[in-house]
Image (tube, rainbow, N blue to C red):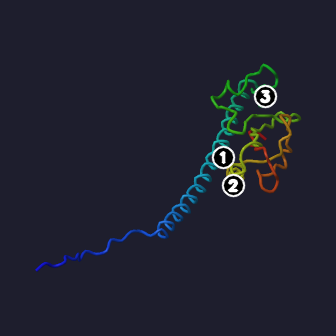
Amino acid sequence: MIGIKTRNSPKKRAFTLVELLIVVVIIGILAGMVMLSAESAINSAKAARIISDIRTMKSAALLYKADNGSWPIWFYDEGSDSYKTIPPGSPGPASYSDLVTKGDGYWVGAMKVSNDHSIAFSVADVRDVSKGVKRSLENQAEKSGLYGGIFVGPSYQPDMDNLPKFNYTNSGHDMLLSVISK
């Protein structure tokens, strides 16, 4: 007798389109969270580099003072794309450190208060760094001893008795100060 063969195998199952879309949405959400976390880490790293450069500038200024008996004035001149020294011809920061003093959107320098030559500070112009980096600098300001100011050019003379902590959010600071000698 000839019979009809039937298969007893289970029905093959595949993912539905809705299930695939849900997986893609979940992966997208997770990737977005990772990207936000990565951006925060990048901003913190850039802020740490700026703080490190300010500390290196402090060391270079101390070496300059040991050699010359006075504090340096080193500032970046955007017009000539180079560092200026006051007095002209005096050794610049490159003579005391291998620090690249112009970074990604910022530069660091050293200055003395004109009316009191015993007071000096290292400075970073952070006008052109991203808002995220400025927020990260603000978060690190207290523990790093960073003060803030509004950039008015290389002749900036802060009130050394009333230095505010760096505060980008409320005060709009775009310059970091770190006291070398007071």
Relative to 51, residue 143 above or below: below
Question: Of marks 1 and 3, which one's residue comes earlier in the chain?
Answer: 1
Q: Which mark is residue 70?
A: 3
Q: Position of residue 153 (x, y in %)?
A: 85, 36
Residue for badge 1:
47
- Tag 3: residue type? Ser
Circles 2 and 3, Cβ within 8 Å, touching? The answer is: no
Residue 2, numbered label:
none
| Residue at the (81%, 21%) spot, across then down | 88
Residue at the front extreme? 1
Distance, label 2 to label 1, CA atoms, is 10 Å
Is 109 placed left or right of 18 in the picture?
A: right
Callout 2: helix, strand or loop?
A: helix
**What residue is shown with label 2?**
139
Measured in 3D between alpha carbons, the distance from the residue under mark 1 to the one under mark 3, in whole angstroms, is 29 Å
Q: Position of residue 141 (x, y in %)?
A: 71, 51
What secondary structure is marked by label 3? loop
**117 or 60: nearer the eye?**
60
Sequence-wise, the earlier of marks 2 and 3 is: 3
- 128 displayed left or right of 36: right
**Of the residues tagged 1 and 3, which is closer to the observer?**
1
Q: Position of residue 142 (x, y in %)?
A: 71, 53
Q: Residue at x 70, y 36 (%)?
A: 58
For disc 2, the neighbor class at 10 Å (few under 14, some 14 to 19, many from 20) is: some
Which three-letter amino acid code belongs to the residue tagged 1?
Answer: Ala
Residue that protrudes farthest toward the left in the picture: 1
Q: Quadrant of residue 83?
A: top right
Residue lying at the far right of the rendered structure = 115
> As shown in the figure, which amino acid type bears the numbered disc 2?
Asn
